[in-house]
Amino acid sequence: MNKKEQILEKLQKLEELIIKTEPNKDEVTDKMFLFSKHMVDNQKNMMNIDEERVTTRDLVEIMNHSNLIWNIRNRVLDGETEWTPMFELEHEMMEFIQKRQKINAIKLYRKTLKDMFSIDVTLRASKETVDLMAQGVPLTAAQQTTSPNMMSQGTGKK
């Protein structure tokens, strides 16, 4: 089995995990998206590899990206938590953190919480959250560790 086939086999396992951990249609409240970002990303990756449109550098990025999805989806499968929109956010933040772009992770975190949940997060709390995530702490646990007084619902404080 060559390298391409090995990676495609693992991405197929990832797809099976994604399907297992997707919310069922009765639980889906998002009327904008039929497929999760994880499913779409995985399909694109498999297609690009299968059609040999990737470099070795691209393969490494695909493997890193897939590891993040694998970690999140296994936590859902193991019952550590239920699927929430925060997993998509965690995934995107971890991609920035892996690329050593913590400032972008902080910006994304603050913007997403503000736009999706009307929660203003201080810069300090955001930085603490990203720093904990960089040490391997999942987003939900990192949020519980940061000071609760650094977040407020819709106050407009930064």
Image (spheres, helix red, strand yellow):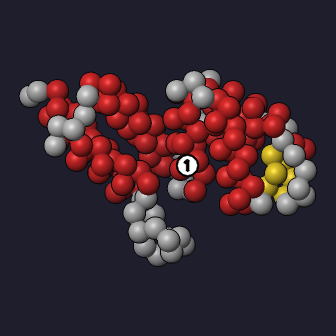
Residue in the picture at 68% in, 32% down: 103
Q: Quadrant of residue 56?
A: top left
Q: Answer yes or no: is residue 78 visible.
A: no
Q: Answer yes or no: is residue 123 visible.
A: yes
Picture coordinates of residue 93 (x, y %)?
58, 39
Amino acid marked by disc 1 = Phe
From this view, report whether residue 149 is shown above or below residue 83. Answer: above
Quick check: 136 left or right of 35? Answer: right
Quick check: 6 left or right of 141? Answer: left
Picture coordinates of residue 73 (x, y %)?
44, 46
Residue in the picture at 71% in, 59% down: 115
Local secondary structure at mark 1:
helix
**Mark 1 sits on what residue?**
87
Q: Judge by depth and name the residue closer to the eye, 21 or 111.
A: 111
Picture coordinates of residue 139 (x, y %)?
64, 40
Picture coordinates of residue 102 (x, y %)?
64, 29
Q: Quadrant of residue 114?
A: bottom right
Residue in the picture at 73% in, 46% down: 110
From this view, report whether residue 2 is shown above or below residue 157. Answer: above
Q: Quadrant of residue 60?
A: top left
Q: Quadrant of the N terminus?
A: top left
